[in-house]
Image: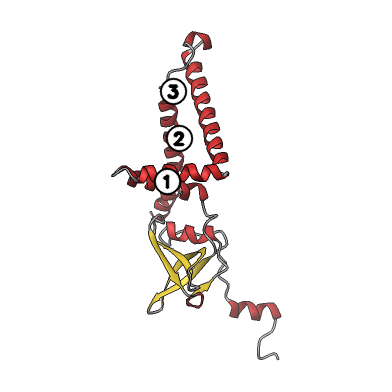
Amino acid sequence: MSSWKRDTARGLIVVLPILVTAYIIAWLYNQLAKVPSPLPPEVYGSPFLAELVGVFVLIVVFGLLVLSAGYLMRTALGDLVEEGIDDVANQLPGLRVVYNASKMAVETAVSGTEELQAPVKLETWNGLRMTAFKTGKTTEDGRDVLFLPTAPNITTGFVIEVDPEEYTETNERVEDALTRILSAGFGETRDQPLPVDVGESDGDDDGSSPADD
């Protein structure tokens, strides 16, 4: 019975993300297909081809717009434009919350784990250790700024200022630490060591026992 439950759970882990991704792609395609094409459907020969060309054109235009905006942000003028947009958005009551939240969400999504430095172990109280991440920032008094995420929702957490000697650096990868947090501690990392009984292996490797010496 336990084997059946385990196989079902693993199957859901594989199938459900694929179905959700396919649903989102289909929904986006249907929304883009509703945009009227500049040319009549008779030019394309079939309504489906007209929808397909229209969606492709919208994706290309959107990609060019994003690249153009990104190139502009690399210049001094781009910084001024971004500051102006932020100032205008922050003057709008209610909408400024939506604007800032969406901007932060996009920055988190596109930056991935690149903005997160090496994971560290932080002792919060009474020997209890928690996983935090170095942000690469420091305060004026020399403390390191760490991000202590919550599990399993890593989009919330605490930004804390800690002295360097108060946390322990590890050799763990960012991806492995995030996997453990996102899975609430149940996830498996890629480099999990195999359990080895050191006492038995030492005796077997030498082919001798302490009594033989």
Number of the front mark, 3 or 2: 3
| Sooner in the amino-acid sequence: mark 1 or mark 2 | 2
Determine the CA span between mark 3 and mark 1.
26 Å
In the picture provided, is 147 more to the left or to the right than 68?
Answer: left
* Disc 2 residue crowd, few under 14, some 14–19, many 20+, Cα 10 Å: few
Q: Is residue 44 visible?
A: yes
x%, y% of residue 193? 57, 66
Task: Work out whether residue 150 can be spotted.
Answer: no
Q: Earlier in the sequence, mark 3 or mark 2?
A: 2
Q: Which residue is mark 1?
A: 103
* Amino acid at pointer 1: Lys
Query: In the rendered structure, which amino acid carries the disc numbered 3?
Result: Ala
Give the secondary structure at mark 1. Answer: helix
In whole angstroms, how far apart are the C-alphas of marks 3 and 2? 16 Å
Q: Residue at x 42, y 39 (%)?
A: 20
Q: Which mark is residue 33?
A: 3
Residue 181, image x, y percentages: 44, 60
How many neighbours does mark 3 have within 10 angstroms: few (below 14), some (14-19), or many (20 or more)?
some
Displayed quadrant of residue 63: top right
Secondary structure of residue under mark 2: helix
Horizontal and vertical percent position of residue 153: 38, 55
C-alpha span from label 1 to label 2: 25 Å
Q: Nearer the viewer, residue 9 or 47?
A: 47
Residue 115 against residue 84 in the figure, above or below: below
- Disc on res. 22: 2
Q: Residue at x 42, y 35 (%)?
A: 24
Task: Say if 135 sits above or below 112 in the image.
Answer: below
Within-10-Å neighbours for mark 1: few <14, some 14–19, many 20+: few
Q: Among all residues in the image, which is located at the extreme left?
A: 93
Q: Are marks 1 and 2 in contact (CB under 8 Å)?
A: no
